[in-house]
Amino acid sequence: TISAEAPYLTYWHYIASNDACGYDYGGVGSDGTWFYVYDLCYETQSNGWEFVSVDISALAGQRIVLDLVTITDSSLSSSLFFDDVAFVTAAQAATLAARAAEQTGPPASPLMGKSGEPETGDATKAPAPADRATPQTYR
């Protein structure tokens, strides 16, 4: 349920793609309403983590299922990674955005490589769910 006190969806995303625009897509939304749609292609690569804050106060009081979606074709690879997804207050969203302007990505994650970029290629290298860092909750 989206709290009226914490109606901001915040997250970091990382886009990597070798494909041309118009073939691979990603998005963040709920129940068919998309907050962001990303064209995953070489021209839109993020070349690093980017912070996003979305005011979803129009959904306050509603129970939603958050959709983080990537749709790709069978040709060149495209990836859309998410980290530190949270629902926060307006003040927390502003603080996170200010901090994001000073750094190049989310805090260290067990799925991150030494370069600070997501590990790709071998899913067996990802830690088991019990080994992952405890998610941070904002109240």
Image (cartoon, rainbow, N blue to C red):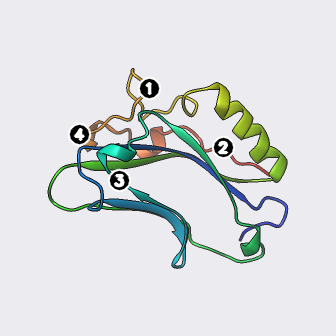
Give the residue type at disc 2. Answer: Gln
Dot placed on the residue nearer the N-terminal end, 2 or 3: 3
Dot placed on the residue nearer the N-terminal end, 2 or 4: 4
Separation of marks 2 and 4 at Cα, in angstroms: 26 Å
In contact (CB < 8 Å): disc 2 and disc 4: no
Q: Using the rendered view, name the quadrant where residue 112 is placed.
A: top left
At mark 1, the secondary structure is loop
Residue that label 4 marks: 122
Residue depicted at x 14% and y 55% = 75
Residue depicted at x 43% and y 39% = 46
Residue depicted at x 38% and y 27% = 113
Give the residue type at disc 4. Answer: Asp
Residue that label 2 marks: 136
Is residue 111 toward the left or the right of residue 58 in the image?
left
Separation of marks 1 and 3 at Cα, in angstroms: 20 Å
Image quadrant for the N terminus? Answer: bottom right
